[in-house]
Image (cartoon, rainbow, N blue to C red):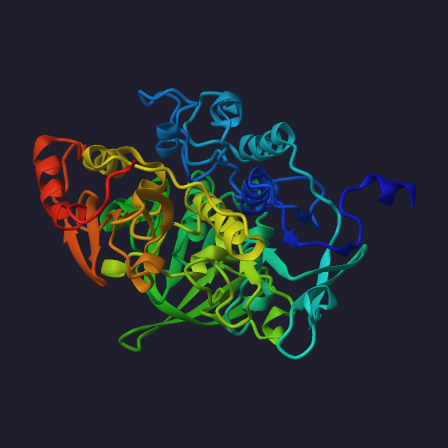
């Protein structure tokens, strides 16, 4: 009992509970604390870091931290080049990652990433009850807020250390439970997370089921070892350098693709996997392509790089709707369950809020550089809507608005990392003047509100450089204006100033100047 007494957040009732201590949970906890919102953080892990305590299997991140970017590390604009540090309001705790990297790569190693998350948590004083496993959930009337018919509700979390209750719960538990499609025989082969030491694949023919990043990561790591690699799945592989987004196999893992095109040490098949058959010390993999042709491939090893699902435990039974192979929860633009109010999500799960998906391009919410901003926006949303803590809204002079908005689309890291999902919103009111509403989900801006306002976002069409988009709301109607891309990604020039000034003139003429 003495050990339990030394841990923070003993079982009981809290205003808000966060489940998970990966980057999403840590960022949310930090942001809630800065807003003065009391909350408890529970985690099954022994220390901060989440999935980065184990993966990626080849120990090198896909996301970069660029040490030299022409911007001081403590400046907000540096976040555009540092995809791995969590966000801090105070300068001393910004950009933790660069100082922890050994300089051999601008992709941090997995241990460096883990150390960065641990360092951020320690420096900022984030408290977590570690070793506390969430096991089940139920919803009951809350006597604290009226309970009963039409009254308040509490969620009750049964954990390995007792029962916790709160009217608001945020789950930041990752998308980390291995998924295996119902292919006969696939259940008996190792999954991505069960990968053996690379030397055990020496001079062997290896069949990799899956052509997403995890499959190509394994193939890249095995290039020096395996005799031949076969990667197979029904859909053709997409490459991020072709889509101009994070959709597709990232450039770091393209070497197997080149080998397949030029050398033959790698074979890439667009085919279904019909069956995996054990054959002595090896396997036979039976495949079928779109034309119906069957091909059986004899191999020494099979690895299932078939993705992961969200470990929601009994939340679907509680009414949380999910979709897709990864069983992501359906969410509002503010990452609340679309079917069970009061349950929210943080971290990589927030990719379940699809946003507008203009040109078919999703948000970057599946990666740290994207969902760290979601967590900050969510903390403010919870503070305002659940706890009555209003956000500070600064006034802006009309003459300063155009250069300010162009600076945001040129250098604002939230807009760069969450293209087409987050937007900088400015309210234009005849009585109160021009106010900065902050960074908000673009979809929420478009779906609600009638006051005159403007929102700017950075967007991509998958064919070239990103470009600014201006949304002007006047008398309840919204007009969308896409501006031209710039080859040097700088939108502060005279032609942009003139165009934006022209777009804003109809609404600015009706907005009061600040006193």
Considering every residue shown, the one lying at the far right of the view is: 1
Q: Is residue 235 above or below residue 373?
A: below
Q: Tell me if residue 255 can be seen.
A: no
The number of discs equals 0
Report the front residue among 300 and 126. Answer: 126
Left or right of 360 on screen, residue 94: right
Q: Quadrant of residue 396?
A: top left
Q: Quadrant of the C terminus?
A: top left
State the image quarter where residue 165 is shown: bottom right
- In the figure, 91 relative to 244: above or below? above
Pick whichever, 58 or 127, lies toward us: 127
Query: Residue at coordinates 14% horizontally, 37% vertically from top-left?
Result: 486
Q: Is residue 436 visible?
A: yes
Name the quadrant containing residue 158.
bottom right
Q: Where residue 479 appears, x then y in whole percent? A: 17, 58
Residue appearing at x 70%, y 42% in the figure: 128
> Residue 460: percent from the left, percent from the top?
23, 49
Q: Give the percent coordinates (x, y) of residue 145.
A: 68, 65
Q: Determine the residue positioned at 12% across, 46% down.
A: 505
**Residue 64: x %, y % from top left:** 40, 34
Looking at the image, which is closer to me, 267 or 148?
148
Above/below status of 415 relative to 183: above
User: 168 or 476, which lies in front?
Assistant: 476
């Amino acid at each position: 009992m003495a050990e339990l007494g030394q841990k923070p957040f003993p079982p009981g009732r809290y205003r808000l509970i966060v489940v998970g201590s990966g980057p999403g949970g840590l960022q949310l906890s930090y942001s809630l604390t800065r807003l003065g919102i009391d909350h408890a953080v529970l985690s099954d892990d022994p220390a901060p870091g989440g999935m980065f305590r184990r993966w990626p299997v080849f120990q090198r991140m896909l996301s970069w931290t660029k040490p030299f970017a022409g911007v001081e590390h403590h400046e907000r604009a540096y976040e555009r080049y540092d995809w791995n540090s969590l966000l801090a309001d105070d300068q001393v705790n910004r950009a933790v990652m660069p100082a922890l990297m050994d300089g051999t790569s601008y992709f941090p190693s997995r241990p460096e990433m883990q150390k960065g998350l641990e360092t951020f948590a320690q420096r900022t004083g984030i408290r977590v009850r570690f070793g506390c496993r969430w096991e089940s959930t139920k919803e009951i009337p809350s006597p604290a807020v009226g309970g009963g018919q039409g009254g308040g509700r509490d969620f009750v979390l049964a954990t390995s250390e007792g029962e916790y209750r709160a009217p608001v719960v945020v789950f930041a538990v990752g998308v980390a439970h291995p998924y295996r499609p119902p292919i006969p025989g696939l259940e008996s082969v190792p999954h991505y997370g069960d990968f053996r030491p690379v030397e055990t694949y020496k001079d062997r023919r290896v069949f990799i089921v899956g052509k997403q990043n995890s499959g190509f990561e394994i193939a890249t790591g095995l290039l020096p070892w395996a005799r031949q690699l076969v990667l197979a799945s029904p859909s053709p592989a997409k490459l991020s350098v072709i889509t101009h987004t994070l959709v597709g196999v990232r450039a770091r893992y393209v070497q197997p693709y080149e080998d397949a095109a030029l050398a033959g040490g790698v074979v890439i098949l667009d085919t279904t996997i019909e069956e995996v058959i054990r054959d002595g010390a090896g396997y036979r993999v039976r495949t079928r392509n779109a034309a119906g042709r069957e091909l059986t491939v004899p191999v020494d090893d099979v690895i299932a790089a078939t993705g992961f699902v969200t470990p929601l435990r009994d939340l679907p039974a509680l009414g949380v709707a999910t979709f897709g192979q990864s069983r992501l929860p359906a969410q509002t633009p503010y990452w609340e369950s679309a079917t069970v109010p009061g349950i929210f999500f943080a971290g990589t799960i927030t990719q379940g809020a699809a946003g507008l998906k203009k040109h078919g391009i999703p948000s970057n919410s599946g990666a740290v550089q994207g969902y760290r901003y979601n967590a900050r926006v969510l903390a403010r949303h919870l503070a305002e809507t659940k706890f009555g803590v209003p956000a500070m809204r600064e006034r802006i002079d009309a003459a300063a608005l155009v250069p300010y908005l162009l600076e945001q689309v040129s250098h604002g890291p939230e807009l760069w990392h969450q293209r087409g999902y987050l937007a900088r919103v400015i309210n234009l009111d005849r009585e109160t003047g021009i106010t900065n509403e902050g960074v908000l989900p673009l979809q929420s801006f478009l779906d609600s509100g009638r006051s005159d306002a403007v929102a700017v976002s950075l967007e991509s069409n998958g064919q070239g450089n990103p470009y600014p988009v201006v949304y002007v709301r006047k008398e309840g109607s919204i007009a969308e204006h896409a501006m031209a891309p710039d080859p040097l990604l700088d939108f502060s020039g005279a032609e942009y100033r003139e165009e934006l000034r022209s777009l804003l003139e109809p609404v600015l003429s009706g907005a009061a100047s600040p006193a």
